[in-house]
Amino acid sequence: MADAFSLQRVLETFRSSLSENKEVYIKYYIAGWQELVSFMNSLGNVFSFISKDVVSKIQILENFLSGENGSNYVTIQSMVKYELENDLVDLTKRGSHPESGCRTLLRLHRALRWLELFLERLRTSTEDSKTSVMCSDAYNESLANHHPWLIRKAVGVAFCALPGRETFFDVMNAGDHTQVVALLGESLPLIAEVYQITEDLYAKNNLLELP
Ligand code: 1Q0
């Protein structure tokens, strides 16, 4: 199957998202998320409320990118500069710009931290490790801090429906366990780098708590 999910492709997309001078291309950043969404969809309907939210955020960013001001949305850096300079971001409470590129990307950015923590757990896990535990530990350490109670509950239910570790390794389509672990070891610094660059940029501009 040519278009089956593969960890390799996720890795390549995130790799393409880094420019030579360490800016992050939105086009590839959202392409990486698109790959992860197709993976999530293959896990079943319990996850559709999660993937729907990711898809709508990808769509918002895609619309900016293909819109008339698209040239300002080429990188996360240019987007932040453009939206801030033109007062296009609701900074303290939701107002006339409830769906700015900055606040939309921030949601994916926080989720990327979850992904990094989860994949690191998967990489170092042993045969009897439970994916639901790895997932929820990673979630509690990251995204959960930004979610209200109801969502945390729903997410908890979804985690119980996760396939086991074996299945995860299989669907990654990256060979046997040793090869998957090696590829994860290769991917994680990259995901961490994209995450850190965005984190620093948002911190510098005081954007980490956008409503
Ligand atoms: C594979 C299992 C997936 C587990 C996902 C864990 C994270 C759950 C987060 C769920 C939140 C969904 C409900 C919507 C919440 C929104 O309110 C919230 C805030 O947005 P807003 O507009 O209301 O302010 N949205 C978010 O926080 C965005 C959440 C995105 C979650 C993305 C999870 C992506 C998971 C991808 C699959 C990864 C598979 C990993 C293994 C593959 C190997 C590379």
Image (cartoon, rainbow, N blue to C red):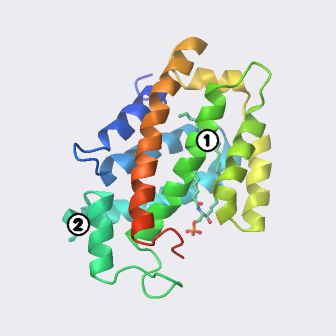
- Residue 16 x, y percent position in the rendering: 30, 39
Q: Is mark 2 within 8 Å of ligand 1?
A: no
**Residue occupying the point 51% across, 19% down:** 182
Q: Amino acid at mark 1?
A: Leu
**Residue occupying the point 32% across, 77% down:** 84
Examine the rendered structure and indicate whether residue 51 appears above or below residue 65: above
Q: Earlier in the sequence, mark 2 or mark 1?
A: 2
Q: Please tell me which residue lies in front, 154 or 73.
A: 73
The C terminus - image quarter: bottom right
Q: Please tell me which residue lies in front, 168 or 41.
A: 168
User: Quick one: label 2, few (<14), some, or many (20+) residues within 10 Å?
Assistant: some
Visible residue check, residue 107: yes
Q: Please tell me which residue lies in front, 90 or 173.
A: 90
User: Can you identify the residue that label 2 sits on?
Assistant: 72
Q: Please tell me which residue lies in front, 163 or 42.
A: 163
Q: Amino acid at mark 2?
A: Asn
Give yes or no for contact between labels 2 and 1 (Cβ–Cβ under 8 Å). no
Examine the rendered structure and indicate whether residue 111 appears above or below residue 166: below
Q: Is mark 1 within 8 Å of ligand 1?
A: no
User: Can you identify the residue that label 1 sits on?
Assistant: 117
Disc 2 secondary structure class? helix
- Residue 181 x, y percent position in the rendering: 56, 20
Is 146 on the left-hand or right-hand side of 111?
A: right
The residue furthest bottom is 95
